[in-house]
Image (cartoon, rainbow, N blue to C red):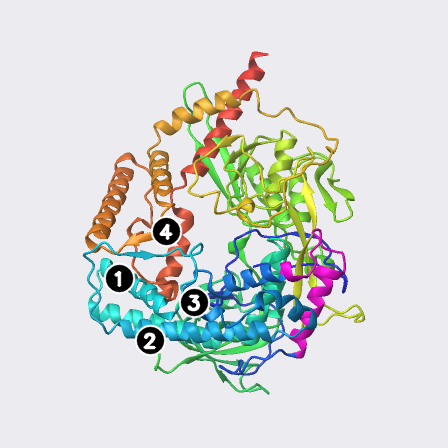
Amino acid sequence: MKIKTAVFGALVAVPVALWAAPKAMDFWLAQTQTDQSAAATAGKPTRRNAPMKTTKDQANASRLLYNVLSESGDPYKSVPLDDARSRDIYKRYLEALDFNKIYLSADDLAKFPNLDTQLDDAIRSGNLQPAFDLYGVFKQRAIQRTQYARDLLKQDIFTFTGQDTFVFDREKAAWAPNQQALDQLWRQLVRYDWMRLELAGRKPDEIRKTLDKRYTNLGKTLNDTNGDDVVQSFLNSYANSVDPHTDYLNPRSAQAFNTQISQTLEGIGAVLQKQDDVVAIREIVAGGPVSKSGMLKPGDRIVAVGQGAAGTAALPMEDVVGWRIDDVVQLIRGKKGTTVRLSVIPAEASLDSQPKLVTLVRDKVKLEDGVAKSDIIEIPAAKGQAPQKVGVIKLPGFYQDFSARGRSQDYVSASRDVARLITEFKSKGVTGVVMDLRDNGGGSLDEAIKLTGLFIDQGPVVQVRDSANNVDVGVDRQPGALWTGPLAVLINRSSASASEIFAAAIQDYGRGLIVGDISFGKGTVQNMQPLFPSFLNTQSDEDPYGSIKMTIAEFFRISGSSTQNKGVTPDLFLPTLVDHTKFGESSYDNALPWSKIPEAPHATLGGFSDILPALQSKHEARIRADREFQWLLQDVAYFKSERSKNSVVLNIAERRAERDRLEAQRKARQAERKKLGLPLDPLSDDSKDDGLSVNERNIATEAAKDKLLDQRPDPLLRETAQILGDAINLRAKRVASK
C-alpha cells in the first residue's frame, strides 16, 4: 500500500522513506490482519449492498487531496489535475478494479462515454459518484462471473487431453469485446482451477465442492466491500498518477500503516485470518496477552466479541460470524489495560460446537516477526585460512515507534535493536558481520542514518533534495562506531528506500562489501500525515478524512548519485529469480528519472577494489563445488525460461509429466542433502502445488509451516558469509606481508 504529506497539520516528526513493495489495488480483502492499537469501538459492520453514495467525509477527503497534490505546491513532482491527468486516473482505476481484464468488457466501458476526462472534475468537486457508478458495474459483472463459474461446475467440460490454453496474465491484453467473449475466458479459468486440484489428487466431487465454495466466497467478498474501500482505491488512483509512492489511505488503512512502521500495537497480540465466514487465529505474537494466557492456539475461531470483563458493566457479546475481518479487528483491538471477551470455537471442533469464553486484558505488543534477528554462521578453516565466526543480522524493515519516542527513551527502534545484537556478537567472538537486508522495503529515514552510524564515525550519510531544490545532508553525529570490524551487506531486488540509503552509504565510505542483486531503485522520500483542513488546529484519533503519503523529496548518495531507478549495484553479484523488467522502480511507468547532485565531502575507508578480483575468483571456485548453489543456478535458469509465458496448456498429461519431473528433482535433492550431510529442507515435502488458495488451507498447518521458513537452506546467505570470511583472510595476509 501507499501514503502522503500535506499542508494541513504538523508533519510527522521524521520523514519516512516508505516501503516500495508492488501494490495490489484490487478489491479482494486482505486475508490476514494483525490486531492493532486504537480505541475499541462496538457496533455492527457496514450493511451489505447498501447503495454507495458520496458521504460528506469522503467529499472532503477528495477536495483536501486535490488541494495537497495539485494546488499546494508541496509535492516533489508538480501534477496539475486536468483532462490528461483524468485519463491517467481512469486507466489506473480500471487496473485497480480489474487488472487482469476478466470481469469488465469493452461493451461495459462503452456505457461510460467521456468518463476518462470527467474524473478530474469529480475529484475537485468531491462528487465521487462516477467512481461508485463504475464500481457498481464492476461488482455486478463480478458477481455474475462467480455465478457463471459455479454453473460451469455442473457441466461435463473437465477433460484435459487437447492443446487449448488458459491465459493467466491478461494485463496487456485488450478488453474482451462483450460478455460472451468473457464466457470463454472464464470457461478456461474454471477448467484450469479444476485441473490443478485434479493434479493434486482430489476426486471430482471434492473438486466441485472446493471450487463452488471458492467462487461463492468471492461473491461474499464483493458484498463486503464498502464505500470507503471504493473511495480509497479511486483516490489512490489519483495519488498513484503523481508517482508510484504517493498514496491515499482511509482512516483504517492509515492506522494499519502506523502499526507497520512502529512494529508495536496495543491489543491482544494475535494475527487473524478470515476463513469462509469466520475470523480465526493464524499466529500468536510472543509476549502478548494471548501468548501469556495459553488459552488460544492457531486455528481457533472467534465467533463473538464483547467489551469489558463479565460481571461488570460489560457490553453484550457481538456475534461476528460473517463480518469483515477489519470490523472484527476493530472490536478486538483497544488500549492497554482494557478488557475484551472472546467467544471461541477450538480449531478441532465443529463450527456448531459450544464456544468457550476467553477474557483478555489488552497490552502493548511488539511484533517480533518484523524486528531484527541474529544468527551466527561458523566458517571452518580452509587451506591457508583461519576459521571465522560471522554474525548475521536479518533486518526486515527500518521501524521506529514515533509516538513512543516522544514520550520515553524506551521505544522500539531498528537501530537500537541492531546495536543490542552487535553488542551480543562482541561477547561471542564474532569476526565479521553480515547485514541481511533482503526483502527490506525501507521505513524510517532517521533509522537509516542511525543504523549507518553504528558502522562509521561521524559523517554524512544521505543527501535529501526537496521540491525547491534545497539540499539537506543527513549526518551521523554520534562519535565513534559500535562495530569497526569486517562488514558485508546482503541486498536483493526487494531491498528498497531506507535499505538503499544504508547500503549506498556503506559502499560510498568503502566500509563494507555489498553482495547480492541490484536493489529496487526507490530514491524518493515520503511523508505521511492526516488530511486535516488548515483551519483545524487539533488532531483526533478519529480522523474522518484519512491520510496522505506524499513524495516530498529525493535522496542522493553522499557520492552525489541518486539511487532512483538505478538502485545500488553490488560489489559481487549473486543469482536472482526476479525479472528486473517487471519488478523494481524502473518497471513503473511514471517513476522519477535518475539524476545527480554534487558530492557531500566524506572520508573513505579504503574499499575493496584491490581484493575484489580475488574474492570473485574464490566465490566462483567455491560455488562450482556447492550443490545447494548449483541447484539454485538450475532454478534461476528454469525461471528465466518460464517467465516469458503468459498462458498454460490445459493438457493434464503434459502438466503431470512436468509435475513429476519437478517432484523427482525435489526428492533427488533432498536425498543428496542427506547423503552429503547438508541441512534438509523442512518444507521439501510441502512444495507441491495443492491447488488451494490461502484461505482454503488448514490455518494451524500453514502457521506451522510459516515457522519453518527461516530453517530452509539459504545458500545466498551462507555464500555471503563465506565471501566476508575470504575478505577477512585476504586482508589479514596483506597486513602480515607488509
In the rendered structure, the answer to whether residue 457 lies left or right of residue 724 reads right
Q: Say if 364 sits above or below 663 in the image.
A: below
* Disc 2/disc 4 C-alpha distance (Å): 42 Å
Q: Earlier in the sequence, mark 1 or mark 2?
A: 1
Q: Residue at x 21, y 50 (%)?
A: 654
Instruction: Give the residue type at disc 3.
Output: Ser
Q: Which residue is mark 4?
A: 646
Q: Earlier in the sequence, mark 2 or mark 4?
A: 2
Q: Quadrant of residue 40?
A: bottom right
Check residue 105 in the rendering and tell me which mark sits there, or answer none. Answer: 3
In the rendered structure, the answer to whether residue 59 lies left or right of residue 94 reads right
Q: Which residue is mark 2?
A: 349
Q: Earlier in the sequence, mark 2 or mark 3?
A: 3
Nearest the viewer among 120 and 110 is 110
Q: Are marks 4 and 1 in contact (CB under 8 Å)?
A: no
Q: Quadrant of residue 68?
A: bottom right
Instruction: Give the residue type at disc 2.
Output: Ala
Q: Earlier in the sequence, mark 4 or mark 1?
A: 1
Crowd band around label 3 with a 10 angstrom C-alpha radius: few (<14), some (14–19), many (20+): many
Crowd band around label 4 with a 10 angstrom C-alpha radius: few (<14), some (14–19), many (20+): few
